[in-house]
Image (spheres, helix red, strand yellow):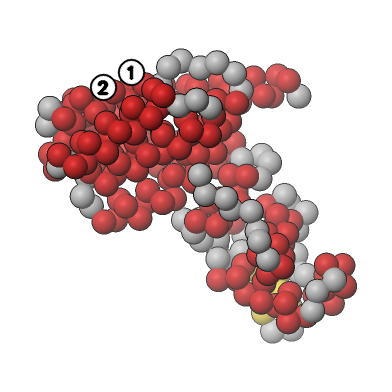
Amino acid sequence: MTDHRPRGLHEQTVETLAARILSGEWHEDMVLDLPALREELDISLTALREALKVLAAKGMIGARQKHGTYVRPRESWQLLDADVMRWQTTARGNAGLLDELAEVRAVVEPAAARMAAERATAEDLAALESALDAMVAAPDLEASVEADLAFHRGLLTAAHNNFLLQIERVIAIGLAERDKLVHSAGPTDDPVPSHRRVLEAIAEHDPDGAENAMLELLVKSAADAKRTGQEVNARR
């Protein structure tokens, strides 16, 4: 799995600033004191401005004449940006985001399964089978999450729609976080049978069966996530 930890001062600064917005420490419309912030972070004003440019490009920060640099509302953020999605899924209090992601999956993935049943090639089916085999053999949490991602990535690839491939990049980030939460919370039902039913319907070129199997998989996934959230809250 890709390591997204920041590796340089610029990335560290960007993620530090993003974390303050996501945590609510910097609230909507708050004007930033750039000289004070530069001194606190012990970086040059140029370095700070370069980091703010990144957040501005993602819709999180804005600037107005005679007003200064300020935090923009969440509705203005580039929510489909890979970094923004990753920052949100790794921040505390992300249950709402994962609920929204589940809604997006419920719209996208059953339709993708239907298209895959109509369009999947032998190569696509082999990739899905390989991902399923990896789920069965996964020795640990990281391998299990990676195999699950590979299956869903393979599903959207098998739909042969370039827009869906773009959506997959966003879904994968949130899906990985959801999987980590669910699997780390304790024993769960075996995910392999529900995924296998999807694959079998696609392999049989059964669009209705593939769509229904994916809907059933997502219902189970949502139930697992809800149960995990309740268990986490009960331990607090």
Residue 110 location (% of width, % of height): 28, 35
Q: Position of residue 233 (x, y in %)?
A: 69, 24
Residue at (68% x, 41% y) in the render: 92
Position of residue 51 relative to residue 137, above or below, is: below
Label 2 with label 1: CB-CB less than 8 Å:
yes
Give me the residue at 43% from left, 45% from top: 171
* Secondary structure beneath label 1: helix
Look at the image and tell me in which quarter the C terminus lies.
top right
For the point 56% across and 56% down, the residue is 84
Q: Which quarter of the figure has residue 66?
A: bottom right
Please state which of residues 160 and 73 is positioned toward the viewer in this rendering.
160
Please state the horizontal and vertical placement of residue 183, each as a whole percent of the image: 55, 25
Q: Is residue 7 visible?
A: yes
Q: Which residue is mark 2?
A: 197
Looking at the rendered structure, the kind of residue marked 2 is: Arg
- Residue shown at 55% from the left, 57% from the top: 83
Name the side, left or right, on which 61 lies relative to 169.
Answer: right
Q: Nearer the viewer, residue 198 or 101?
A: 198
Element marked by disc 2: helix
Residue at the bottom extreme, as displayed: 65
Q: Is residue 71 visible?
A: no
> In the rendered structure, which amino acid carries the disc numbered 1?
Pro
Q: Residues within 10 Å of mark 1 (few under 14, many from 20)?
A: few
Side of 67 relative to 207 (left or right)? right
**Image vertical order of residue 111 relative to residue 223, above or below:** below
Quadrant housing residue 203: top left
- Please rate how many residues cluster around mark 2, counting C-alpha atoms within 10 Å: few if below 14, some from 14 to 19, many from 20: some
Q: Nearer the viewer, residue 150 or 44?
A: 150
Residue 89 vertical placement versus 37 (above, below)? above
Instruction: Return the residue at label 1.
Output: 193
